[in-house]
Amino acid sequence: MLRQALLAAARSGHIKTAVTAAPLSRNVVERFVAGETIDDALNVAQALHDQGMLVTLDHLGEDTHDADQADTVTRASIASVERLFESGLAKSADISVKPTALGLKLGADGPKIARDNVARVASAAKAAGCTVSVDMEDHTTTAETLRLVRELRSDYPDLGAVVQCYLRRTEADCGDLTKPGSRVRLVKGAYNEPEAVAYRASDEVDRSFVRCLRTLMAGEGYPMIATHDPRLIEIAGALALLNGRSNESFEYQMLYGIRPDEQRRLAGQGAKVRVYVPYGDDWYGYLMRRLAERPANLGFFLRSLVTKS
């Protein structure tokens, strides 16, 4: 029930206004978000790189409302790629892009606008030596997002796809995506979806994660295992051994601010570990979904709400 309440709060304009207007300590945001600017994100990326880890940068924001705004977001993503190149971090970095932020929901032309904008970012990333992953959002965008990835992979074969195991369709999607060289990030999912399309009980979601993981590890693609769950991390390692995978043939992914000791432990054992580093001032929805994924974080958050900045 708490998880569903937090997910509902992520979409509530009234709650967003109350929370963002509160004397919120910087500590609560800085625990999960690198900062507001690309410079903040690069500072975090450099620190993680120095610890032997890879990064994904995500400029926070969703639901673009016009083509000009989508173009602005696209240019900001390209600027991030250019800054990564200038900093020498490009080869260890991935850029995460959200289809809705790049125009997916802009009417009948939305899918084409988003596809063209993702292609612009992917082209810049290819020149710089980094990669791009197309993030997954709520279930109403899943089919169009996967279609976009399929269409662009002929020109950008390392374009990453994200799949959410709490969706009932995802096990089949994993089978379709396990092509040679294809990059697939497996996550649990962080939106409030109806039972008709998604598993809602945590044990059902976990079982779906393992089924999807088996498919990806046995396939010819490059699995990106995004979880903080110790049981799932252990299962991923076992499946890698079972399928004869080297450490270079898959990676673990974790969120900035979540289980940093585990991130360092895995990296110290020779595993590839990528940390998802969000930045930007549109942090509210992201933060609420992170709290929903791990409600134990809620106590920390509530204490910070009453702390003077």
Image (cartoon, helix red, strand yellow):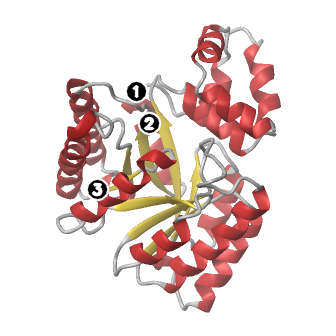
According to the image, label 3 marks what residue? Answer: 148
- Comes first in the chain, label 3 or label 1: 1
Q: Amino acid at mark 1?
A: Thr
Residue 189 image offset from top left, x and y in percent = 59, 51
Q: Nearer the viewer, residue 250 or 14?
A: 14
First in sequence, mark 3 or 2: give its number.
2
Determine crowd level at label 1: few under 14, some 14-19, many 20+ residues with C-alpha closer than 10 A. Answer: few
Percent x, y for residue 233? 68, 68
**Residue on which the image places disc 1:** 37
Q: How many marks?
A: 3
Mark 2–mark 1 Cα distance, whole angstroms, equals 7 Å
Residue 72 occupies which quadrant of the picture? Answer: top left
What amino acid does circle 3 point to? Leu
The amino acid beneath tag 2 is Ala
Q: Is residue 4 left or right of residue 66?
A: right
Residue, x 36% and y 53% (percent of image)?
145
Point out residue 104 in the picture as x, y percentages from the top left corner.
31, 40
